[in-house]
């Protein structure tokens, strides 16, 4: 069972990771940070978070989508909600084309309050 307050944050930008950690910790969430798409599915399986916040472009432009596809193929992580944060405009279309369920999108740049609203809705805190 997922821990209601644990969130895995995956982004290759250390400034974004630091900002997310500060915002989410202040809001009462436990954060687990990871700086690349590689290894994320295994981390999510081990940590069993209530939510994964994921950058779209890390090692390559669609690394985030590949992580979501891997999560959806594993019985342990298949239902874990994912919030993709991206400056790319076509993310929602790419998610829809791949028929990825349980994925929300937040466009960068975003206001911290908007991030926290999305997180609260997704973890049902």
Image: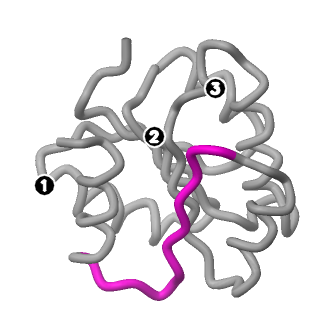
Give the number of the mark in front: 3 or 1: 3
Which residue is at the front of the view, 78 or 15? 78
Q: Pointer 1: what residue?
A: 27
Say whether residue 29 is magenta. no
Q: Residues within 10 Å of mark 1 (few under 14, many from 20)?
A: few
Q: Do the residues labelled 3 and 1 touch (CB within 8 Å)?
A: no
Find residue 100 and report its horizontal and vertical position in percent: 73, 48
Quadrant holding the C terminus: top left
Q: What element carries label 3?
A: loop
Q: Which span of residues is magenta-colored?
A: 101-112
Q: Which residue is drawn at 29% across and 76% down?
A: 114
Q: Pointer 2: what residue?
A: 8
**Dot 2 or dot 3, earlier in sequence:** 2
In the image, taking residue 82 as reference, residue 12 lies left or right, namely right
Q: What element carries label 2?
A: strand
Q: Residue at x 59, y 25 (%)?
A: 43
Q: Which mark is residue 60?
A: none
Which residue is at the front of the view, 125 or 22? 125
Find residue 91 and report its horizontal and vertical position in percent: 72, 73
């Amino acid at each position: 069972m997922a821990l209601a307050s644990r969130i895995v944050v995956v982004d290759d930008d250390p400034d974004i990771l630091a900002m997310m950690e500060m915002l989410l910790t202040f809001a009462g969430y436990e954060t687990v940070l990871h700086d690349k798409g590689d290894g994320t599915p295994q981390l999510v399986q081990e940590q069993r978070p209530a939510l994964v916040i994921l950058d779209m472009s890390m090692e390559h432009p669609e690394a985030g989508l590949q992580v979501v596809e891997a999560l959806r193929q594993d019985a342990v992580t298949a239902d874990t909600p994912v919030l993709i944060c991206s400056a790319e405009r076509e993310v929602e279309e790419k998610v829809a084309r791949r028929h990825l369920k349980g994925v929300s999108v937040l466009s960068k740049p975003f206001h911290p309050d908007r991030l926290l609203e999305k997180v609260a809705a997704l973890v049902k805190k």
